[in-house]
Amino acid sequence: MADEKKFKTSMGDGFLVYMTEEEIRKDLAAGAADAVKRGKVSPLTDDEMEHLYNIVIMPGKVVGVEPGREVVSTNDSGSYKISSKCLISIRRDEQAAIAERVLGCDSIDIGNTDYNYKTVKGIADREASTMRMALQKTTMPLFYGAMTNLGFYTKPDGPVENWSMLLPEGRIEEAMEAQEEAIEHAVRDIEFVAEQIYKAGGDGMNFDTTGAAGDADFLAALKATEVIKEKYPDLAIEIGMAGEFVLGMHGKLEYDGKRLAGMYVHDQVKMAEKAGASIFGAVVNTNCNKSFPWNIARVCTFIKACTEVAEIPVHANVGMGVCAIPMNEILHTDIVSKVDKALIEICNIDGL
Amino acid sequence: MAQEANHAISSCMGGVRTAGDLVLRMQMTHKMKIDDAKEYVANKLGVNLEQLSDAVYMTELRDELGIGTQLPFITDANFGMETKFNISEKLGMKINSVERFKERAGIKKAELMV
């Protein structure tokens, strides 16, 4: 008896795995069920699950979306990855031009390699100068990008007490107060950077990996969005998340009367809308120990629930380790393109 | 290869190769969903949706309109900031860098943008 046919796919860490149809369908079902259970969202339809299966087993080094369904891209490249990762010595303004006229990007962000607003505040005018140079030589819109990264505001490097030290000691109230204080610092820093970028002519700000330090981190981004949109209403803001679930490091913080801790993607987008964000960057974290079928089904279930309620454009974040992209610096082109195809054709996203 | 290129090949508009930069501008400024943004840009440029994603057709059109292409090596081709002056006019929208340029160059006071 011949061996059952196996399809080449990937694990969440990027390493290849071969799976039978039965194994793939089993993992698809399990991944989708995990999202339904955790997010309390609707499952994918039978037709969508079948389409997803067909995408997973598609042959070819690259698969593509149906013509006419192309979307647009934003990113958190910082215009420094050619120099910082590939070790090709090119200035960021030139990397922005390469992104436009060589890589085919729809936009790119200028950013500091130490990709957070606290660091950038001290060099904001220099960053704005790089933005100005890049704007001179590009056509596509340019963002300035960095992380809110609230953890950088803790002692000994920052001004407030370290809640990660306080919490294990049971000093809950002090930990909560420290986070609330850090929010105010972060909002001021982001506002300062935004002012420089606006004056330089930048098209938008990208708040990357929002919520990485928990609910206070997310609230800082939401408050900063409010402040910036009030002062510079034409400056676009993209809020890109850190994960599908907002960690409750504080636990009691609310925005628009809703508790932020525990929010899943479809609730996060409503907060971003309320704050005035132009684009929401949806994230579902990749599980390295699970297969690509498991991850992509889980991702599609969460992201479809998000786009169904979103009134602003949703750009699914498809960098390393998110939205079923494996957690690996080097990626298989077929897996990346299958993620794109699934997110566009099943989840109706507006961008990547 | 750069992940950006991977996405551009499999699923994105390719920026100035077609009209990806213009569609994104409508998302950024008017919070338009992808289909609405494409339709808006297509109407403004007088093309249909198929042409909007056609790199060969759009390169001809973009060159003619002076709104930037992937290969702006012809002497007369517009490039960089020049293209954004024309995009601002063709799409009927203010672009921050264009307004700042006008202000700094003394062409006119920057207008309050909406």
Image (tube, coloured by chain):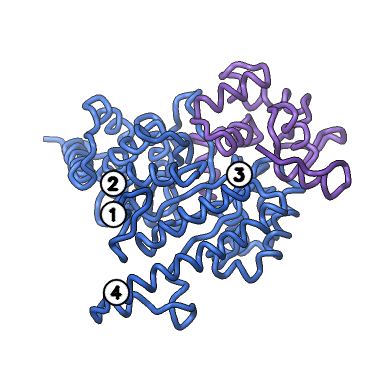
Q: Could you say which is closer to the camera, residue A93 or residue A54? A: A93
To the question of a shared chain for discs 2 and 1, the answer is yes
Give how far apart the Cα atoms at labels 3 and 1 are.
38 Å
**Image-quadrant location for residue A300:** top left
Residue A334 drawn at (x, y percent): 41, 41
Q: Colour of chain B?
A: purple
Mark 3 secondary-structure assignment: loop
> What distance separates the C-alpha of mark 2 from that of mark 3?
37 Å
Q: What residue is shown at x 70% (from left), y 36% (from top)?
A: B94
Q: Which residue corresponds to mark 2?
A: A295
Q: What's the residue type where badge 2 is placed?
A: Asn
Q: Quadrant of the N terminus of chain A?
A: top left
Mark positioned earlier in the residue sequence (4 or 2): 4
Task: Look at the numbered disc 2 and give the secondary structure of its residue.
Answer: helix
Dot 4 amino acid type: Glu
The chain shown in blue is which? Answer: A
Residue underneath mark 4: A173
Real-space CA distance between mark 4 and mark 1, rounded to the nearest whole angstrom: 33 Å
Q: Nearer the viewer, residue A101 or A301?
A: A301
Task: State whether residue B29 is above or below residue A235.
Answer: above
| A306 to A264, vertically: above or below | above
Q: Is residue A151 above or below residue B92?
A: below
| Circle 3 residue | A233
| Of pointers 3 and 4, the one earlier in the residue sequence | 4
Q: What type is the residue that disc 3 sits on?
A: Pro
The outermost residue toward the front is A257
